[in-house]
Amino acid sequence: RYIFQVCLLDVKVELKDKLHVVFFNEELETRDSLCCVCLGEFELKEELVEMPSCKHIFHLDCIHLWLYSHTTCPLCRSSVFIPSTKTSVDDNDHPDSSQTSLV
């Protein structure tokens, strides 16, 4: 069980490092103006994280805390893990199934 927890923590740290950071502006304000994790308002030029699958945005610290215990968007619950479209061919020339990527 301990090994599983350490592996999961490594995945979440890697995930956190790959999230897309954006700066809040007037265009984003038309989509979202509140962080649904803390219910705080976004401020112009504030650093936020945009989720890769659903494009919802959150305060940087809020989403990092969320991702330590979840692998889904806090708003719509879509998975943060996105299936990779890359396929590879093994030594026997049989394509492998799609792999899952962190973002």
Image: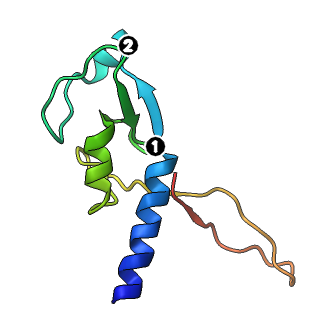
- Residue drawn where x is 77% and y is 68% of the image: 88
In which quadrant is the N terminus drawn? bottom left
Farthest residue, direction left: 39
Q: Which mark is residue 52?
A: 1
> What kind of element bears circle 1?
loop
Q: Is residue 9 above or below residue 1?
A: above
Q: Are marks 2 and 1 in contact (CB under 8 Å)?
A: no
Q: Residues within 10 Å of mark 2 (few under 14, many from 20)?
A: few
Q: Quadrant of residue 63?
A: top left
Binning the other alpha carbons within 10 Å of mark 1 as few (below 14), some (14 to 19) or many (20 upward) gives some
Residue labelled with disc 2: 27
Q: Nearer the viewer, residue 97 or 75?
A: 75
95 vs 36, left or right, is: right
Q: Quadrant of residue 26?
A: top left
Residue 100 percent across, percent down from the top left: 55, 64
Kindly identify the amino acid type of the residue bearing the numbered disc 2: Glu
- Which residue is located at x 51 percent, y 57 percent? 102
Badge 2 marks a residue whose secondary structure is: helix
Residue drawn at (63%, 66%), measured in percent from left and top?
Answer: 98
3 versus 34 height, above or below: below
Q: As drawn, which residue projects farthest toward the bottom?
A: 1
Q: Amino acid at mark 1?
A: Pro
Is residue 53 rendered to the left or right of residue 97?
left
Locate residue 46: give its quadrant: top left
Residue 48, percent from left and from top: 36, 31
Of marks 2 and 1, which one's residue comes earlier in the chain? 2
x 33%, y 52%: residue? 78
* Mark 2 vs mark 1, CA separation in Å: 18 Å
Image coordinates for residue 61, horizontal then vertical, percent: 29, 42
